[in-house]
Image (tube, helix red, strand yellow):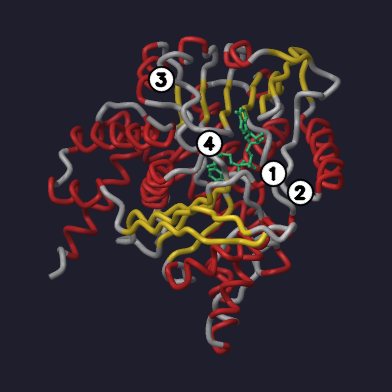
Amino acid sequence: MTEGTRIYENVGRQFNKAADLMNLDPNIRKILEKPMNEIEVNFPAIMDDGRVEMFTAYRIQHNNILGPFKGGLRFHQSVDINEVRALATWMTWKTAIADLPFGGAKGGIQFDPKHYSKTEVEKITRRFTFALGNNIGPEFDIPAPDMNTNAQIMAWILDTYISTVRPHERQRSYHVVTGKPVDLGGSVGRDKATGQGVAFLIQRWAEDTGLDLKDATYFVQGYGNVGSWAARLMKELGAMLVAVEDASGAIANHAGIDPDELLEHTTAIKMRAARATDSMLVDGMVRDYPKAEQIEHETFLATEADIFIPAALENQITGETAPLINVKLVAEGANGPTDTDGDAILQERNIHVIPDILCNSGGVIVSYFEWLQNRRSEFWDLEEVDRKLHKILMKSYGRVKDKSEEIPTDWRTAAYIIALARLEAVYQGRGIFP
Ligand code: NAD
């Protein structure tokens, strides 16, 4: 069984638990169980040495009853159809909880961009965009960054897409992707949005539970977009970072790690490596940070702290690893870091979880702001973006908390129930064609 299959099965179990508990209409349950559209493309790209390499990629469009399909694009060697199905399904729940006029989708190209030059990554990105053709579009399906993709990659998608539409449509097609560079129609605050959302939600949870963040400790898995922003924004709230892990390994310092200094360190390594290899997506490498000691993965997971922010991969907290976790709160920056066995153990051990579909929704919320700004030819400042993001997240937080107390159930199931109830109401109102 692939990791992707395990992840997708996990989504099925989460869905069934919530659907049973809320008595979801059986007809609507059948509809939501499967993605609407599944696009698999195999396309060639010419490498720097003249060779042609074939790539397999997916765009899974799970549901669009609430609005255009919306979801990130991931470049990773382990991308498979089931992983993308799982990520697309989570997007449908995420946009529904935040009350956004979007559905859920996700895409991925199965390759490791770190082993390709910048020119090759550009060609692969553009060729995939071309292969998708009208399967994406500003009012139909809107990609965004995810693991190993960034604003530059969104800019190439934008440029390729608008080069293929009629000249009259070009200027009004900028919202075909979000997470673009600000100069190209991106929104200020999108880069930090997911991490900002994680920090806002932790802050609210700390207020509710009486945890003083000025005395609190936290550790982070993943030091890319989500992890590094969450870590730095938690520092602004006064909390102390005590351990970090990325693809290179794990480090700890119980007297504290400065998240800004750590980012300077990883960025410097990245720049050096990028110059040496001509690759644009070199990983940051926390391992060699001199002001912390290197630790093993299990020791990292067992770090004693108040808060754990997983912000890297799926299935990190499982039946096997959940007994190691030693915190009060797991704030899921990543998608799917906890499987259902892991969830059950965390619950037994009274470890609270802010679930991914709420916790990392800041990214898609600010993507929605970017989409709106492009559509209306507006430009919002950071204060406005952050204020609106905060407002939506606090509303979602309150609804999830209230629902979990009303049922009563855990927050993940409560969040699912909110999403499923919204989708159920819309399907029941519209009926099923013909
Ligand atoms: P990224 O590519 O910027 O960073 C990924 C990080 O994970 C890197 O630091 C990498 O070293 C680390 N990593 C990879 N393999 C690892 C391993 N085996 N052990 C430990 N760390 C490892 O990606 P990102 O955009 O920060 O996304 C991280 C997670 O957050 C993903 O689950 C993604 O789906 C989710 N997410 C991202 C956004 C967004 O706006 N970027 C929004 C919502 C959710």
Q: Earlier in the sequence, mark 1 or mark 3?
A: 1
Look at mark 1 in the image and give the residue it sits on: 114
* Beta carbon of the mark 4 residue lies under 8 A of ligand 1: yes
Name the front one of labels 1 and 3: 1
Q: Position of residue 55 (x, y in %)?
A: 54, 54
Amino acid type indicated by mark 2 = Ser
Q: Earlier in the sequence, mark 1 or mark 4?
A: 1
3D distance between C-alphas at marks 1 and 2 = 6 Å
Of the numbered discs in the image, which one, if any, rests on residue 342?
A: 3
Give me the residue at 49% from left, 71% from top. 138
* Front one among 192 and 378: 192
Q: Is residue 174 above or below residue 304?
A: below
Amino acid type indicated by mark 1 = Lys
Q: Is residue 370 above or below residue 402?
A: below
Say whether marks 1 and 2 touch (CB < 8 Å). yes
Of the numbered discs in the image, which one, if any, rests on residue 334?
A: 4
Q: Earlier in the sequence, mark 4 or mark 2?
A: 2
Image quadrant in which the N terminus is located = top left
3D distance between C-alphas at marks 1 and 4 = 20 Å
Look at mark 2 in the image and give the residue it sits on: 279
3D distance between C-alphas at marks 3 and 4 = 15 Å
Give me the residue at 28% from left, 31% from top. 13
Q: Position of residue 420 (x, y in %)?
A: 27, 46
Amino acid type indicated by mark 4 = Ala
3D distance between C-alphas at marks 3 and 2 = 36 Å
Looking at the image, can residue 209 be seen? Answer: yes
**Disc 4 residue crowd, few under 14, some 14–19, many 20+, Cα 10 Å:** many
Report whether 330 appears left or right of 257.
Answer: left
Report whether 351 appears left or right of 119.
Answer: left
Mark 1 secondary-structure assignment: helix
Q: Earlier in the sequence, mark 3 or mark 4?
A: 4
